[in-house]
Image (cartoon, coloured by chain):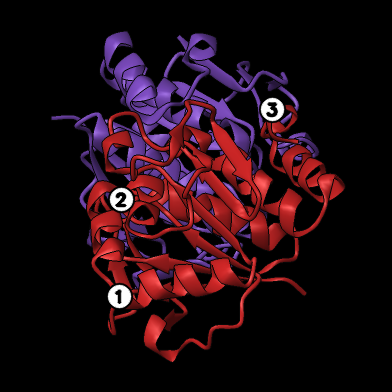
Chain colours: A red, B purple
Amino acid sequence: MKKALLILADGFEEIEAVTPIDLLRRAGIKVFVASLGYNTSVKGARGITVEADYSLSEIENDFDALILPGGRNGAKNLANSKIVLSLIEDMNKEGKLIAAICASPAVVLGKTTVLSGKKATCYPGCGGDFKSDVIYVEDSVVIVDNIITSRGPGTASDFSLAIIKVLLDDNSAVNISKQTLFKSIQEVI
Amino acid sequence: MKKALLILADGFEEIEAVTPIDLLRRAGIKVFVASLGYNTSVKGARGITVEADYSLSEIENDFDALILPGGRNGAKNLANSKIVLSLIEDMNKEGKLIAAICASPAVVLGKTTVLSGKKATCYPGCGGDFKSDVIYVEDSVVIVDNIITSRGPGTASDFSLAIIKVLLDDNSAVNISKQTLFKSIQEVI
């Protein structure tokens, strides 16, 4: 069974966190939801508190994918964590999937080397946080090698379906899309 | 300021709960999230625990809108609550907005009189729970008088934008749609 780690930091964007957890679990991917800090109750940008399954400090690095939701403050908190930044670099070296949405592609991945020379997208207006060697594009979802980037709450379903497609296969993504009545799987597979 | 009550019961569908809370709060609507039971930690259908702001027993009935997320078990739990059923009837008599998605239009509103003679939609396969005087349609979002019904996780954003449109106005719905990069506001306004 594929295993994904999703990290919640205070100020995370709720739709961008809950949509991948929900859709990946429907697809049979084991999603470990970890809080950045020791407190597993994490408050999102719109005031919704989600209870993480673990604190990041309890988690072993043994995942097929890392998922970083956005939210301006949530992304800043992730970017200020040396543990998160080294986890990203380590997983990238092993070719593991790294998926970031909204502010996180620019604000978090932008502090690492994983996007060097690659195309990527992010929430409109956040592109300035990318390093100069990143090719910024405005597609809803960008898949390049082992990195998936996406734009905001409205692209969270396509982002999630793209992760399912990469971790599993096209059929799994189509099945989850149909089951949940999301329409735009055609754009991402 | 408009006030909406959203009720979380064990087994609620996470995307269908979080999307309206998130988008309505962005629009400046005060969303009260209440747990059906005394325990304010409520576990969704995909294992995500959300912390409600209140228990339903603490809440005064003084809202402009009632929002019922789906999830088969979540909807069943709502439908088994006399408090919820009488709240629906009371708010309907006052012409307040009642919005239900996924299994909830059929499983919950189907146990009340509020849809009598009206068009409504729900998650595919749940239509059998409607009373015989409901006109079942397959539109993503159906707005008839003070009732909004919708189909599933993939229609949760249109459902939320429809609620914003009815409680506030078209412009507010369009603004939130643009800000969050959801595309399909054209279908609901």
What is the x, y in percent for residue B112? 56, 37
Please state the chain letter of the residue tagged with numbered disc 2 in the rendered image: A
Q: Is residue B12 above or below residue B154?
A: below
Q: Is residue A132 left or right of residue A54?
A: left
**Quarter of the view holding residue A79:** bottom left
Mark 2 on the same chain as mark 3: yes
Residue B8, labelled with which disc?
A: none
Circle number at residue A82: 1
Residue depicted at 57% across the width and 70% down the height: A93
- Position of B23 relative to B163 (above/below): below
Q: Position of residue A141 (x, y in %)?
A: 57, 36
Residue at 61%, 82% (x, y): give it.
A62
Q: Nearer the viewer, mark 2 or mark 3?
A: 2
Q: Quadrant of residue A180?
A: top right
Report the side of A105 relative to B43 (left or right).
Answer: left
Residue A127 screen position, x and y as percent = 33, 35
- Describe the element under mark 2 as helix, strand or loop: helix
Numbered disc 1: what chain? A
Mark 1 vs mark 2: tell me if same chain: yes
> Can residue B75 be seen at all in this image of the molecule?
no
- Hey, what amino acid is under mark 3? Glu
Inspect the image, locate mark 1, and give the three-letter code of the amino acid beneath it: Lys
Of the numbered discs 1 and 3, the one sitting upstream in the chain is 1
- On residue A187, the disc is 3
Amino acid carrying label 2: it is Val
Q: In this rendered view, identify the residue nearer to me: B122 or A12.
A: A12
On the question of residue B56 being in view, the answer is: yes
Q: Which residue is tagged 2?
A: A107
The quarter in which the N terminus of chain B is drawn is top left
Q: Quadrant of the C terminus of chain B?
A: top left
Residue sticking out furthest to the left: B1
